[in-house]
């Protein structure tokens, strides 16, 4: 049977850093459970980063990628809000994930992508990509001046 490997990434609403602490393991467990429930879908690699989920999945041709992502995002939202009722009030309208997702079909570079997903958090910390502070203005290219009052 022919299966297609896909790299998928999706983010929580407003890119909130909710996946970081106590929810990280729970969200991972929920996504693993949902992936195991779909026959033929296999998880190769996964990482719950502070502001997004990164998955490498084998998806058989009988499912579309959008069907699998919709299933994962929809069902996981319900399960997250069921287990963590306080999040309903913070996120309102029962939407935990942002609209949309990123998907890339993997070919010969599957091993590299698997390594990237496994080492992504260390690379992010090393290059300080998790910081929201701008040191150089992206529009002018000049150093950002801080207003000290």
Image (spheres, grey):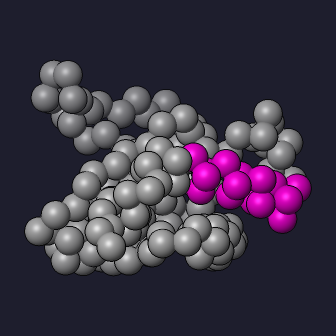
Give the residues drawn in magenta, as a range. 70-85
Q: Position of residue 30 (x, y in %)?
A: 67, 70
Which residue is nearer to you in this view: 73 or 52? Answer: 73
Q: Residue at x 13, y 29 (%)?
A: 141
Residue 69 in sight in this render: yes
Q: Within the magenta stretch, is there residue 75?
A: yes
In the orientation shown, which residue stands out farthest toward the top? 140
Picture coordinates of residue 3 (x, y %)?
32, 67
Using the image, determine if residue 76 lies above or below residue 136: below
User: Quarter-wise, where is residue 55 in the image?
Assistant: bottom left
Whole-percent x, y for residue 48 in the image: 50, 67
State whether residue 98 is above or below residue 120. Answer: above
The x, y position of residue 62, in whole percent, is 44, 56
Quadrant in which the N terminus appears = bottom left
* Quarter of the view holding residue 145: top left
The dominant secondary structure in magenta is: helix
Rendered residue at 80%/36% (across/down): 92
């Amino acid at each position: 049977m022919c299966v297609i490997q896909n790299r998928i990434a999706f983010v929580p609403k407003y890119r909130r850093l909710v996946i970081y602490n106590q929810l990280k393991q729970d969200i991972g467990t929920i996504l693993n459970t949902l992936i195991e429930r779909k026959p033929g879908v296999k998880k190769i690699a996964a990482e719950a980063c502070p502001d997004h989920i990164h998955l490498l999945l084998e998806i058989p041709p009988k499912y579309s990628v959008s069907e699998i992502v919709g299933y994962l995002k929809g069902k996981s939202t319900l399960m997250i809000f069921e287990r963590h009722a306080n999040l309903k009030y913070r996120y309102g309208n029962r939407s935990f994930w942002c609209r949309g997702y990123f998907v890339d079909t993997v070919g010969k570079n599957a091993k590299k992508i698997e390594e990237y997903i496994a080492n992504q958090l260390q690379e992010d910390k090393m290059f300080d990509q998790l910081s929201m502070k701008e040191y150089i203005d992206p529009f002018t290219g000049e150093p950002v001046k801080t207003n000290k009052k």
